[in-house]
Amino acid sequence: MPGRADTNRARCLLKNKLTAQFSPKFSVGKYLGRKMPNIKVFSGSSHPDLAQKVVDRLGIELGRVVAKKFSNLETNVEIGESVRGEDVYIVQSGSGEINDNLMELLIMINACKIASASRVTAVIPCFPYARQDKKDKGVQHTSRAPISAKLVANMLSVAGADHIITMDLHASQIQGFFDIPVDNLYAEPAVLKWIKENIPEWRNCIIVSPDAGGAKRVTSIADRLNVDFALIHKERKKANEVAAMVLVGDVKDRVAILVDDMADTCGTICHAADKLLEAGATKVYAILTHGIFSGPAISRINNACFEAVVVTNSIPQDRHMKECSKIQVIDVSMMFAEAVRRTHNGESVSYLFSNVPY
């Protein structure tokens, strides 16, 4: 049985600990770090800025990792600290040199797994090959098209990933390609916040989908804003080329907001913007989760009639913003940081589906 002296000593220690923990001098970052033991966050080469923002939000340090290429361009990754028994998160987006970055992610996952990490989570803000999610008839009615998104899912699982965190998958059914848990976050809460803060006439706006596939996404945003929606039906001759567009809905004398999950060469949204102006829209905005902006995208946006083209930082946008003044960025690092924190602590992530964490 412990004596009275031992009991008093334990009380004093507890009191001192609580006083130190909640004193005004106590750092929030240190407190979060103490509350989150056994966690390591590593960054791949694709988006180190986002990874740094995530760890800053969590109040922890970014894990040490060295990624390099041999002279024959093979990727080599060295994890610079122990991950034994740790909950590991690897941040790597599907942007830039996509194939190299994907291979780097797979090697990092495997390196952590065989170094005895207890769980490895791949944080992939923009999922690579997401558009190749089904056999599409296309123009030549071929049935020999690959389902590359399924292949990527298999590769991640075989590499050793235990969990995937991503944002606005091109088709939400891609979650079914995995036999491991997938948390598909939505940019919608951050988009709603941006619309209300930056478009004064948002109550008189109309939300427009540039294709029929995005109708569900657009109706959800329109319902939350209590405004109307429209959609544009497009027919493609071949990939990245739009043949004809038909507007379904009335945009006359309204602010039109185009919403889509990604923009690559921007042919679709630029044609859609012209169509909306022809139909009588007063202003046109475009809000896109993943701004890939490859090929002639930037010159098309510069020549188009957009008030602003708004994207998230799921893909690095610094170079694009320098080349085009119309591009604005919504920071979603806090959503990924909160998803990491909730996953690590075993809490529900569904709060993030309709709220922006502050």
Image (spheres, grey):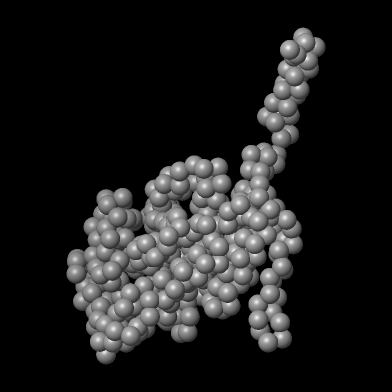
Instruction: From the viewer's side, name the closer residue of 134 and 23.
Output: 134
x and y percentages locating residue 199 in the rendered image: 39, 57
Q: Could you tell whether 63 is left or right of 287 in the image?
A: right
Q: Could you tell whether 30 is left or right of 104 in the image?
A: right
Q: Could you tell whether 239 is left or right of 29 in the image?
A: left
Please identify the quarter of the rendering in which residue 153 is found: bottom left
Q: Residue sitting at 25 percent across and 70 percent down?
A: 212
Q: Is residue 59 above or below residue 176?
A: above
x and y percentages locating residue 329 in the rendered image: 50, 63
Q: Residue sitting at 78 percent across and 15 percent down?
A: 6
Q: Is residue 274 above or below residue 139?
A: above
Q: Residue sitting at 71 percent across and 35 percent down?
A: 26
Q: Is residue 356 in sight in this rendering?
A: yes
Q: Is residue 25 above or below residue 41?
A: above
Please identify the quarter of the rendering in which residue 308 is found: bottom left
Looking at the rendered image, the quarter that the N terminus falls into is top right
Q: Could you tell whether 113 is left or right of 204 in the image?
A: right
How many numbered marks, from 0 up?
0
Task: Kindly give the residue lying farthest to the right in the view shown.
Answer: 5
x and y percentages locating residue 114 in the rendered image: 65, 62
Q: Residue sitting at 55 percent across and 51 percent down?
A: 340
Q: Is residue 243 in sight in this rendering?
A: no
